[in-house]
Image (cartoon, grey):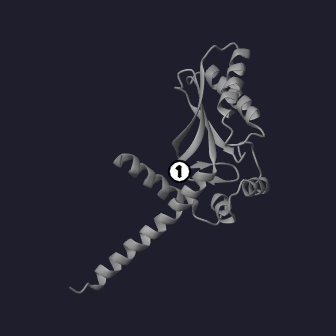
Amino acid sequence: MKLKRWEIALLASLIAVLVFCALPIRAQNRLSEKLVRLHVVANSDTEEDQRLKLLVRDAVLSAADGADAEDETLPARLQAAAEQTLRENGCQDAVTVKRTRMWFDTREYATFSLPAGYYDALRVTIGAGEGHNWWCVLFPPLCAGVCEEDLTEIAAQAGLTDDEIAFLCDEETPYVIRFKVVELWGKLLNWIS
């Protein structure tokens, strides 16, 4: 059976779309193996709980400064820092800190963007954990407002390749399209499972 020209064109288009979609997904998967995200979840959305969340964030970032992503004692240290901060501010809410692999949507930062996908994370949950959250990249340490030069240097020191760094911060690359493809792919996989 001989294929018609329109069938060949349709098949070629389908292959091109699959290749176009596979590249950002592979890039996101490589990045997710090298990054550890920090996720701080407030007890609730009250003004006070949101204020406490930011204080806990600052304490956790300070406690993690200079730490290694593989440090098994890190969750306990972060929990102690979070609890101390809450107690100093008159709050008795419980805090849990756990390592987890979780889904993050595409996130735009001042100097770079991260594609949606599953990432390893240290998740800090305050109280019921029903409030708005805050997240960033804990390892390599990209949580603080880093300029693009700092980002490139920190990312290179953490073992990201030039291509991975370019994927994060090259303004000429159509990230919105790439990241949307990764986000849609992840949502499809979540829906299937």
- Image x and y of residue 148, in percent: 75, 55
Residue 161, quarter of the rendered image: bottom right
The residue under the point 55% across, 56% down is 28
Q: Residue furthest left?
A: 1
| Left or right for 108, reference 148 | left
- Measured along the vertical axis of the image, is residue 64 above or below residue 28? above
Would you call the spot at circle 1 few (<14 residues within 10 Å), some (14-19), or many (20 or more)?
many
- Measured along the vertical axis of the image, is residue 90 above or below residue 119? above
Which amino acid does the dot numbered 1 rest on? Answer: Ala
| Left or right for 189, reference 150 | left
Residue 134, quarter of the rendered image: top right
The residue under the point 58% across, 21% down is 46
Q: Please state which of residues 44 and 40 is positioned toward the viewer in this rendering.
A: 40
The residue under the point 69% across, 12% down is 90
The residue under the point 29% across, 79% down is 7
Task: Work out whether residue 65 can be spotted.
Answer: yes
Q: Please state which of residues 54 and 1 is positioned toward the viewer in this rendering.
A: 1
Secondary element type, mark 1: loop
Q: Residue furthest bottom?
A: 2
Q: Please state which of residues 77 and 153 is positioned toward the viewer in this rendering.
A: 77
Task: Work out whether residue 54 can be spotted.
Answer: no
Q: Which residue is mark 1?
A: 116
The N terminus is located in which quarter? bottom left
- Image x and y of residue 146, in percent: 76, 48
